[in-house]
Image (tube, rainbow, N blue to C red):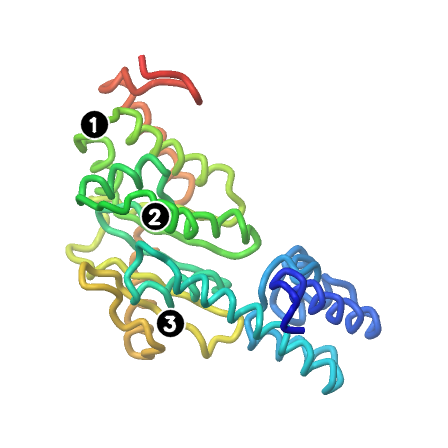
Amino acid sequence: MSRLSVEAQLVELGKILVAARVERGQTQGELGDALGYTQPNISKMERGKTRIHPHLLDKWIDVLEIDSADAERMRRYNLAARADRVWNARRLAASPAWFHPVFEAEQEAAIVLKWTGERISGMLQTEDYMMEQFQAYGRTDVSDAVHERKLRAKLLDDYPDRTYKFILSESAVHRLTRARTDNPYVALGQVRHLLNLARTHPAATIRFVPFGNGPLHVGPDFTILQFVNSKLDRSFAETSNGVQTFMNDTETYDTDLQSWESLSSVALSAEESAILLEEAEADLISTRPNAVRGPGEPLR
């Protein structure tokens, strides 16, 4: 088994899962209902296209009453594949060590809730925006940093059946439309990317807290991760010194969840937020006509 590639191990694991489900006479949809996952996600796991969290695998084993021998084989395949994934995360060249468990957990969470005040969440950033941001901070490893941030943004496309909710301050939009940039397309491209996600992405919900209705003060940007197994739920705040309280701290999690609910209660609706982005797009076009171009066209 050790000679099998990661991909081959996941395929073998998927074959056992399919055989067990068929033997029990369940459809992918029925199994998904029992596990709390959608049918497309069950299909992806059965085809070996994604790794499976150990707690979910244990639940799968219990629901289908898989015998102990097959269950042990499944756990070995899954453990080897996940070990490779953790190793790959640890090889992240541009990110500090504290980011690695965050990277791993974000890829496993069923629901991701992100609050950001004056900045655009990394998962929502365009490559041009990332590039200029890292260059502005004097990073010498810009290519690696952009690549790693794109891995986080790629989650939206890799797992469209999961739930990603973003709440941002209205000031994040105003910073985009007013900020100085060497490339006038960066801000417009970022606004259009947000608008496209807001309008068309099945997994992403983007909302803004307006100045006139927002709280006087909100703490640091934070992320809440919720899993199929709620015992794994956690939250963390990203600061200049790294991630704070990433471990499963119940008190911090509850506080962040209350903050999220409070922000959500005063945020614009998804439709109102999309209109805000449309207004920002129009503002950029009127004030920076040189930024208007089509894909692949030069600035004019």
Mark nearest the camera among 3 and 1 is: 1
Tell me if residue 254 comes above or below residue 193 in the rendering: below
Question: Which residue is disc 2 drawn over?
Answer: 144
> Judging from the image, what secondary structure is the residue with disc 1 in?
loop
Among the two numbered marks 1 and 2 on one chain, the one whose residue lies closer to the N terminus: 2
- Residue 265 badge: none
Left or right: 10 in relation to 167 = right
Task: Quadrant for the C terminus, please.
Answer: top left
- Residue 97 position, x and y percent, is 30, 66
Are the two marked residues, 1 and 2, in contact with CB atoms closer than 8 angstroms?
Answer: no
How far separated are the C-alphas under marks 1 and 2? 21 Å
Mark nearest the camera among 1 and 2 is: 2
Residue depicted at 26% across the width and 24% down the height? 184
Question: Which residue is disc 3 drawn over?
Answer: 234
The amino acid sitting under disc 2 is: Asp
Residue depicted at 40% across the width and 46% down the height? 150
Question: Which residue is disc 1 drawn over?
Answer: 182
Left or right: 10 in relation to 54 = right
- Residue 118 position, x and y percent, is 22, 47
How far separated are the C-alphas under marks 2 and 3? 28 Å
Which residue is situated farthest in the front direction here?
3
Are the two marked residues, 3 and 1, in contact with CB atoms closer than 8 angstroms?
Answer: no
Return the residue nearer the eye: 252 or 60: 60
Mark nearest the camera among 2 and 3 is: 2
Return the residue nearer the eye: 266 or 176: 176
Residue depicted at 44% across the width and 40% down the height? 198
Neighbour tally class for label 2: few under 14, some 14-19, many 20 plus, Cα within 10 Å: some
The amino acid sitting under disc 3 is: Arg
